[in-house]
Image (cartoon, rainbow, N blue to C red):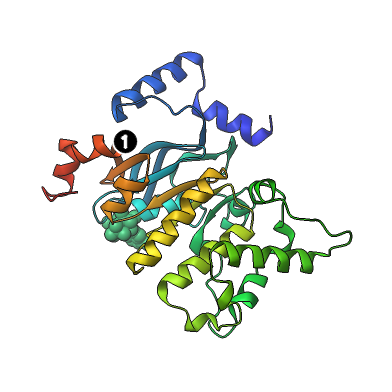
């Protein structure tokens, strides 16, 4: 076990008694026990902005290979939590553990290198470059063999330099997302939905294991939304894990197997979509509106 893993483990549970106690309180707090195989653990996360506490001791875990939704009313602390997870913000307290490694306070680039990528962490596409050129801007040293290659074996060339590998992978991604016909188009001419597909394709080029998607369906028309969601499910079948912040409750209820609800910087409830939909506290948090 690495030093950081040991640190994370010891911080998470200093003694067996404390571990049992924290598991018990997690169950009490959220209505379920720790997940079977957490790829991400957010532990007592706190983030202040001056006098504002945006995240106030949030605790949750994300099951490996799941599509998990993170929801909550405006200002609940979802984006700040995302930013603390991905290293955009340094939390004031608490820990973020990804795949057994303590990533708390590490910079976004380092976090992405561990395999945890937030779509907008990938530099925004450059409008005056073509779609393929944008794909080619992905970091060349990150062309790994992980999830993508293990499921989509392709004939290996004998001598393939990094540039060629990247080009080959870029085409695979564009074909997968069915935007290969736009390869020569300027990114600035893409629709909002096509841009989201490009963003996802570029994120996958960095070989992540887990993707954090912040409102992936905002501004996407229904037919592209359907396409995007089917890609997300297909990627899940290949082993990727997704955590998504999304205000569209149909997307959350129909496509996530687990839902975490934040309110006032903390986790108010979590469970499967049906439980969440009928949870009185959650309904209340949404000001009595339907969720
Ligand atoms: N950079 C910042 N400086 C000061 N306050 C901030 C900053 N970012 C967020 N906040 C505040 O922290 C709280 C949580 O904001 P956050 O954006 O995390 O919520 P959210 O759940 O993502 O909301 P929304 O659904 O509206 O995007 C809000 O009160 C917000 O005003």
User: 226 or 159, which is in the foreground?
Assistant: 226
Any part of residue 89 in sight: no
Image position of 87 with respect to 176: above or below: above
Image position of 7 with respect to 46: above or below: above
Q: Quadrant of residue 103?
A: top right
Residue 237 drawn at (x, y percent): 53, 44
Q: Circle 1 is placed at which residue position?
A: 272
SS of the residue under disc 1: loop
Residue 187 drawn at (x, y percent): 53, 80
Q: Quadrant of residue 246?
A: bottom left
Report whether 233 appears left or right of 48: right
Extreme residue in the top direction = 17
| Location of ligand 1 given as a quarter of the image | bottom left
Any part of residue 200 in sight: yes
Report whether 204 appears left or right of 94: right
Q: What residue is rendered at 55% in x and 79% in y?
A: 126
Residue 79 drawn at (x, y percent): 38, 55
User: 209 or 9, which is in the foreground?
Assistant: 209
Residue 65 drawn at (x, y percent): 51, 40
Report whether 42 appears left or right of 111: left
Image position of 133 with respect to 253: above or below: below
Q: What residue is rendered at 25% in x and 56% in y?
A: 74
User: 11 or 126, which is in the foreground?
Assistant: 126
């Amino acid at each position: 076990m690495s030093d950081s893993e040991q640190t994370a483990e010891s911080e998470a549970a200093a003694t067996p008694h404390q571990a049992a106690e924290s598991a018990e309180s997690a169950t009490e707090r959220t209505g379920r026990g720790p997940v079977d195989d957490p790829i991400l653990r957010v532990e007592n996360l706190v983030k202040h902005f001056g006098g504002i506490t945006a995240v106030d001791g949030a605790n949750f875990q994300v099951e490996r290979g799941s599509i998990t939704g993170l929801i909550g009313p405006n200002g609940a602390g979802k984006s700040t939590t995302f930013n603390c997870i991905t290293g955009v913000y340094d939390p004031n307290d608490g820990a973020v553990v990804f795949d057994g490694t303590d990533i708390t306070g590490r910079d976004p680039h380092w976090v992405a290198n561990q395999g945890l990528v937030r779509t907008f962490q990938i530099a925004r596409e450059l409008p005056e470059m073509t779609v393929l050129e944008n794909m080619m801007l992905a970091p060349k040293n990150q062309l790994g063999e992980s999830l993508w290659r293990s499921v989509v074996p392709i004939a290996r060339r004998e001598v393939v330099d990094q540039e060629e590998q990247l080009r080959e992978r870029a085409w695979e991604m564009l074909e997968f997302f069915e935007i290969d016909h736009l390869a020569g188009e300027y990114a600035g001419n893409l629709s909002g939905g096509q841009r989201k597909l490009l963003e996802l394709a570029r994120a996958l080029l960095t070989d992540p294991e887990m993707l954090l998607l912040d409102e992936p369906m905002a501004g996407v028309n229904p037919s592209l939304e359907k396409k995007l969601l089917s890609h997300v499910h297909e990627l899940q079948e290949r082993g990727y894990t997704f955590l998504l912040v999304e205000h569209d409750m149909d997307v959350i209820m129909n496509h996530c197997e687990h839902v975490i609800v934040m309110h006032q910087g903390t986790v108010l409830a979590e469970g499967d979509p049906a439980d969440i939909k009928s949870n009185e506290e959650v309904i209340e948090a949404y000001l009595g509106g339907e969720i």
